[in-house]
Image (spheres, rainbow, N blue to C red):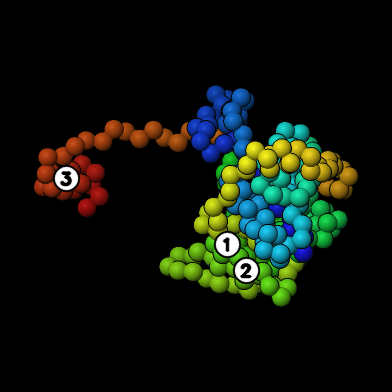
């Protein structure tokens, strides 16, 4: 069973991004980039399935600039067997990525695609769902547990007020939530080994996909600054302020 794992290169989660002065987006020049954290969890899960003898091959895919090769090498250092870079300078939106992944699913015929539940840069939470729709495959999103057996995936999802367990037939799309696993650190020998693993580069046109953006960003603004708080002397003063100043009670 082959597993395909899309991995996105995003601004590192420790970086505090700044909005560009002209409001066209956030400034990512010279900031640290890393693999989207939910995609690290997806790779870890796929590698564990391979180690358990359930999967035979783990293929990582990244779509974007040539620098996404680093993200693919990081995925291979965790344990992916090979990488595919869909190289383009065009800023990719979730529908374009889903179409590229659909084309790759046609070529690679994976039984499972494990995506992150969302990319921490655009927070779209759309690509996995769009891919499932384009393929006509079942989907189970926000997985906190994944068991694969007998041509089906049993997926536990965290929902308001408890856990939901779904069983879906393969091939299918699963997206990862934070509690699915804790990704391992790549060891130095594995980082070295990853440099020799196969990495294929294709262009969107090779896959017959038009990746032109369909949505335009009108404006990006910083959240409003919070005003400083005040310390109250006692509960009576707090109630008075809530009643007469904030007028919320
Ligand atoms: P999003 O819908 O943008 O929040 O992304 C959800 C998931 O789709 C990510 O966690 C990745 O698994 C995958 N994905 C999105 N964009 C890309 C990309 N450019 N390259 C590879 N995978 C991607």
Residue 230 got which mark?
A: none
Residue 11, horizontal then vertical, whole percent = 59, 36
Nearer the viewer's eye, disc 1 or disc 2?
A: 2
Give the image location of residue 117, x and y in percent.
Answer: 60, 54
Q: Which quadrant would residue 155 be assigned to in this image?
A: bottom right
What residue is drawn where x is 71% and y is 45%? Answer: 76
The residue positioned 70% from the left and 59% from the top of the image is 50
Where residue 118 sits: x, y (%)? 59, 50
SS state under label 1: strand
Q: How many marks?
A: 3
Between residue 78 and residue 190, name the one nearer to us: 190
Find disc 2 in the rendering and name its residue.
147
Label placed on residue 143: 1
- In this rendered view, identify the residue nearer to me: 128 or 209: 128
When the figure is inspected, residue 56 is found, relative to residue 90, above or below; the finding is below
- Residue drawn at x 73%, y 41% as measured from the top left: 194
Left/right of residue 97 with respect to residue 165 in the rendered view = right
């Amino acid at each position: 069973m082959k597993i395909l794992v899309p991995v996105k290169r995003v601004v590192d989660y420790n970086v505090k991004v700044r909005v560009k002065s002209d409001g066209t987006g956030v400034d990512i020049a010279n900031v640290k980039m890393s693999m989207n954290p939910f995609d690290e969890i997806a790779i870890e899960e796929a590698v564990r399935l391979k180690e358990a003898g359930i999967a035979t091959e783990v293929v990582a895919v990244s779509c974007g600039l040539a620098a996404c090769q680093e993200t693919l090498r990081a995925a291979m250092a965790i344990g992916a067997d090979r990488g595919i870079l869909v190289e383009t300078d065009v800023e990719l939106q979730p529908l374009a990525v889903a179409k590229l992944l659909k084309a790759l699913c046609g070529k690679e015929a994976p039984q499972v695609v494990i995506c992150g539940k969302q990319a921490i840069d655009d927070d779209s939470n759309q690509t996995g769902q769009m891919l499932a729709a384009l393929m006509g495959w079942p989907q189970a999103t926000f997985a906190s547990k994944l068991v694969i057996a007998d041509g089906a995936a049993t997926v536990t999802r965290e929902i308001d007020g408890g856990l939901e367990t779904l069983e879906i037939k393969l091939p299918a799309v699963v997206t990862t939530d934070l509690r699915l696993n804790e990704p391992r650190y790549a060891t130095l020998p594995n980082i070295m080994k990853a440099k020799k693993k196969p990495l294929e580069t294709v262009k969107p046109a090779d896959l017959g996909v038009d990746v032109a953006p369909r949505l335009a960003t009108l404006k990006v603004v910083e959240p409003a600054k919070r005003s400083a708080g005040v310390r109250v002397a006692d509960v009576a003063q707090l109630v008075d302020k809530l009643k007469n100043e904030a007028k919320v009670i």
